[in-house]
Amino acid sequence: MDTVERKKYSDLIELGIVFAFLFMIITIYVPNMIWEEEAEAAENARFNIQTVHDVEYFYKILTDNYESNGLWAMNVVNAVRDSVLADSTYLGERNFELIGESVSVNIPDGFDVEYDTTFGFLKTRRDTIIDTIHTVVLYSEELSRNDTSFITKDDLSLIMLEESFVSDLGYETKQRSEVVSYYDSYKPDSSNFYCPLTTEKIVVDIKNDGDILRITSPIKGIYSEGRYVLFSFKTRNHGYIEDGSRSWDQ
């Protein structure tokens, strides 16, 4: 084998090693990427299933029945939330028109709070708060003499009305940090009623003469999509919620 042939052979070996290395990287990382995609798809699909279930839950609170047409139930529930948001006294038995239909509901106290916490993401933030602290003199019966106390500006007006109040010695401001929990609420819309993969409608099944509600993923069998020629994205039915119990928690 002459020098030229030997060099060609060596170059082919090096090229083969490079391709083998690239193939090894692909076979390690691409499946992981697909698994992450499958997990995210399952999470999004189950989020929609949960949202449909929660809409039906609120519809039953308002009407004492489940509704096979989930989109109609959503429109009723959202309309009631908007009305309570506009008028906090909009409670009890109410009748209104919605898309040309007459709707009768019974709105319980606290409906708006439960709606916002159900259709919302619990988050935290750190707020900087500046407190105004007053030093006041009060006569203490137990000590039989004047005593000093520290109170916030908001409480000062009440303290000054007490018989034991003697004087306000002044105030100072203090800065503190406080962690606050809050709900980032959202309003369910029509997109929540469809599978994010197949775009088929999530199944609402009312059983046992309307007593049991089952919300199910529309995927039947295996859903598959090609990925990077050699691989595929695969997933099965994403589960159901029946009578409040979620299949993916079992």
Image (tube, rainbow, N blue to C red):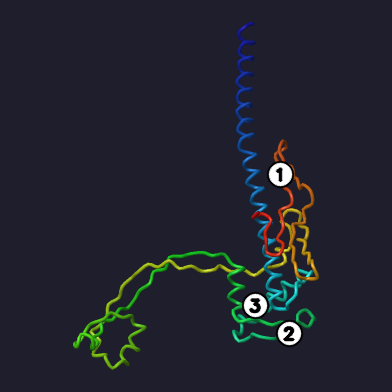
Crowding near pointer 1: few (<14 within 10 Å), some, many (20+)? Answer: some
Q: Which of marks 3 and 1 is nearer the N terminus?
A: 3
Crowding near pointer 2: few (<14 within 10 Å), some, many (20+)? Answer: few
> Whole-Å distance between the Cαs marked 3 and 2?
13 Å
Q: Which of 191 and 104 is in front in this view?
A: 104
| Quarter occupied by residue 48 | bottom right
| Quarter occupied by residue 167 | bottom left
**Residue contact at pointers 3 and 2, CB within 8 angstroms:** no
According to the image, label 1 marks what residue?
Answer: 233
Q: Is residue 198 left or right of residue 92?
A: right
Rendered residue at 64%/30% (across/down) = 23
Q: Nearer the viewer, residue 233 or 107?
A: 107
Q: In this view, does 39 lie to the left or right of 168?
A: right
**Place of residue 139 in the rendered image (x, y in percent of width and height, measured from the top left):** 23, 88
**Place of residue 142 in the rendered image (x, y in percent of width and height, measured from the top left):** 23, 86
Quadrant into which the C terminus falls: bottom right
According to the image, label 3 marks what residue?
Answer: 81
User: At label 1, which amino acid type do we have?
Assistant: Phe
User: At label 2, which amino acid type do we have?
Assistant: Phe
Q: Is residue 231 above or below residue 137?
A: above
According to the image, label 2 marks what residue?
Answer: 96
Rendered residue at 26%/81% (across/down) = 149
Rendered residue at 61%/68% (across/down) = 118
Q: In this view, does 229 lie to the left or right of 147?
A: right
> Whole-Å distance between the Cαs marked 3 and 1?
39 Å
User: At label 3, which amino acid type do we have?
Assistant: Arg
User: Please, what secondary structure does the residue beneath circle 2 have?
Assistant: strand
Q: Is residue 136 above or below residue 192?
A: below
